[in-house]
Amino acid sequence: METSADTGPRAAVRPDGQARRPIELSAMLRFADLATDHLAAAREEIDALNVYPVPDGDTGTNMFLTMSAGRDALREQAALDPEAEVAPAMQALARGSLLGARGNSGVILSQILGAVAGRIARATSDERAARVLAEALSEATEASYAAVGRPVEGTILTVMRAASEAAAPFVDAPGARARDVFGAAATAAREALARTPEQLETLRDAGVVDAGGRGLCVVLDAAETVLTGRRAPSAPAPLGTHQIPTPRPGEDLTPDGPAYEVMYLLDADADAIPPLRAALADQGDSLVVVGGGGLWNVHVHVDEVGPAIEAGIAAGRPHRIRVVHFAEQVAAARAKVARAGETHGRAVVAVAAGPGLGALFEEAGATAIPGGPGDRPSAAMLLEAIVASGASEVVLLPNDADSVSVAEIAARTAEQDHDVRAAVIATHTQVQGIAALAVHEPGRAFDQDVLEMTATARHVRHGAVTVAARQAMTMAGPCEPGDVLGVIAGDFAIVGDDLEQVARQVLDRLLGGGGELVTLVGGAGDGAGQGSLAQRCAAYVTERHPYVDAVVYDGGQERYPLLLSVE
């Protein structure tokens, strides 16, 4: 995060001539990505620490989903106008995390993110980044404490306060930099986290640190990494001289505790919130109400669901109502612990546009789901395949641009409802999926495997040959029904009248930037046999590019006589 004090005279203006902002949007995007990735990696560890206020084993998952929702909203806003002001993007981050907040710690995290985003949005070009961020952390602490009905020390609140107190001296410190603020804040947060068992008996008895506080440390560590390039310690400090044991979710569930978790979004005026807080405080505990501007996120643990929802109706319009029965959730958490030894590693689910492609994916060890243009799989179909795999980790290859969002929904549902760690490689074509699957290595760490597969898919140069079904205007000019179209990187770049000639032009363009391997996938009705279009193109590659290898597959896909890629 850059300021003139951070980077010298050149920081006064951006390359586009505009005044440089104390906090640049690019830095916030990096932070949101890194925080989401780190929470994903720490999710199971944080879930295992979850013994307070209810040992239901979902704190890590809830904080990841909250951060992920904020990140997605931020990226969506930034994509609309990459040069836009920071304020709209910060509003998107705050609203996205508010709408996506899950669980007690997730709701508090959304309030923290909202407060930080709000202070950054108000920053002026002449303010130092260190001052803005230190004040943002202070406002986040105030907002998080204010949101909780009965604040309890030894929780995420304590860790947040320690971070903001460590950052406070940098508000007026001459020459202070953004990295100084978060270096101090993240260190203080980790130290406060190690002390949480001294403040909360439930944690001390279980031999763990606070789960919500641990999740917040992950987020603060991500900010420190963005600013300094240093990777903070990834595990909580041990208690005393022995390592933190893994608790068994549900061991401390007592019959006199609240039976239900009730959450809902609420459209209401600000003056309706104090009476709502009072009404819900009398009904249960773990009350958190966050938001503003007419939209609120309400969370409470109660014995009776009806009155909690009726209190929302009295205050405004509740929607997205979610009720969790703790006994059922704890039973699921116990089942997850019992099931941990039964799952069999990692699986890959790939969408195949033809029977040949399906066979190819399955030979490589993936589960193939039929689908392609005009017959794309639903999120339910992909979710069914994820669950049926019996794996604890699943990688999805949608292999179609329009199926990526569907795969994301299936992956998120698998995470939320089936305790399966799922990741989507945003493959837009079948040949990208083939390349990604070729580097899949189940023995690697999950995040590393996903990273390698993603990088490989992104570096594939891909094309295709198809036949126009109607009159249209393409980037290569007008086309008529029956014209042959050459596709390069998703765009219609060539219009011709001969399949092989157009395919050769596509190959030449793809190989113009070099390459070592060409993959050719023959379509339905032509295949990959001798004399097929795919084989003729392979012979052309051998003749014109003798140092490039060519492999041919019979894909059986409709609409595209040939799919091509260069690696």
Image: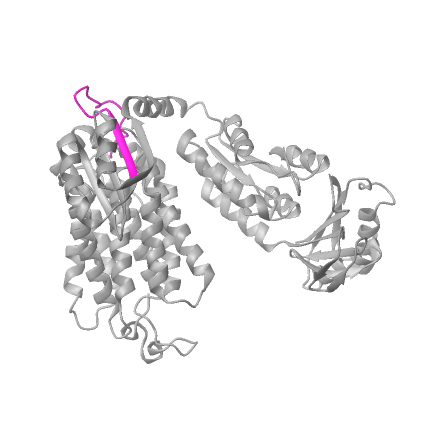
Residue 195 x %, y %: 15, 42
Instruction: Residue at 17% x, 42% y: name it.
Output: 148
Give 114 or 434, whichever is nearer the viewer.
114
Is the image coloured rainbow, by chain, by secondary structure, or in one colour? one colour
Above or below, 54 against 214 in this view is: above
Position of 315 relative to 25 (above/below): above
Highlighted range, magenta: 244-264
Q: Is residue 493 left or right of residue 436?
A: right
Residue 498 placement (x, y as % from top left) = 84, 56
Which residue is painted at 43% across and 68% down in the image?
83
Residue at the top extreme? 255
Q: Residue 300: which quarter of the image?
A: top left
What is the total number of numbered labels drawn onto the structure image? 0
Pick the front one: 344 or 31:
31
Residue 416 sits in quarter: top left
Is the magenta region chiefly helix, strand or loop?
loop
Q: Is residue 115 above or below residue 389?
A: below
Q: At x 82% / y 47%, what residue is drawn?
A: 535
Q: Position of residue 342 (x, y in %)?
A: 44, 22
User: Is 17 in the magenta?
Assistant: no
Q: Is residue 452 left or right of residue 195?
A: right
Q: Position of residue 232 (x, y in %)?
A: 30, 51
Residue 508 seen = no
The quarter of the rendered structure image containing the C terminus is bottom right
